Image (cartoon, helix red, strand yellow):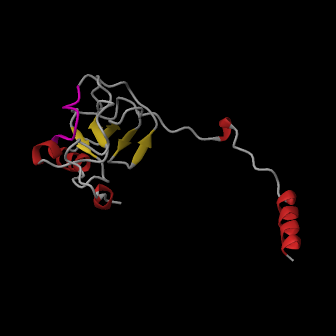
Amino acid sequence: MLLSACADTAAAIDAMPPLTAPHPDDTPEEPVMTSEHTIDPSVPPTGAGCADCETAGGWWFHLRRCATCGHIGCCDSSPGQHATAHFESTGHPVVRSYEPGEAWFWNYATDELYGSGPELAPPVSHPADQPAPGPAGRVPADWSAALRR
C-alpha cells in the first residue's frame, strides 16, 4: 500500500508543469525616490543610534534616517517607534533605512516604498559593528518578546 501511494505521488509530481522563475523583465521595478520628496541630501545624520532612545536610555531594533533633517529614529517594530513619531511631530515624510547594506526609502505620507533614491550625506548607515538590536548593553535578554508587530 505504501509503495502504491509513493508511486501515485511520484506520478503526480512528474505530471506537474516545471516551476520556472519569472524573467527579470517581468518583475516590476520598485520606484525610485527623487529629491522632490522633501529630501535634503546634504544633511548628515544626527548620530549612530536612535536619538530619542539614547535620551531615554532605551533600545531599538532597526534604525531609520529622516531624509529631510537627518534625525535617526527607531523602526515601528522597536518599542519606541521614534521614526514614525518624528514624522508625526515634524511632517517630514521620507525616511531611508539606516541599516548597513540597505538603501530603500519609505514615504509615511503616501505609504510608499522606494527601492532607491538620491545619495545622502555620509554615513549612510550605523556603524557595521553596532549590533541590531542595539545599542549593546541596553537590549534586554527577552528583546524579541518586546518587538511590536
Residue lying at 41% horizontally and 35% vertically, measured from the top left: 102
Q: Main secondary structure of the magenta part?
A: loop
Residue 135: horizontal and vertical position, in percent? 23, 41
Residue 77: horizontal and vertical position, in percent? 32, 54
Q: Quadrant of the N terminus?
A: bottom right
Number of labelled discs?
Answer: 0
Segment colored magenta = 44-51
Residue 18: horizontal and vertical position, in percent? 80, 50
Q: Is 79 included in the stretch rendered in magenta? A: no
Q: Please state which of residues 149 and 67 is positioned toward the viewer in this rendering.
A: 149
Residue 53: horizontal and vertical position, in percent? 17, 46
Residue lying at 41% horizontally and 46% vertically, measured from the top left: 112
In the rendered image, the vertical position of residue 4 relative to residue 120, given as above or below: below
- Residue 57 lies left or right of residue 10; in this view the side is left
In the rendered image, the vertical position of residue 148 relative to residue 83, given as above or below: below
- Residue 32 lies left or right of residue 134; in this view the side is right
- Residue 121 lies left or right of residue 113; in this view the side is left
Q: Is 49 included in the stretch rendered in magenta? A: yes
In the rendered image, the vertical position of residue 128 relative to residue 92, given as above or below: above
Residue lying at 48% horizontally and 37% vertically, measured from the top left: 31
Residue lying at 31% horizontally and 59% vertically, measured from the top left: 148
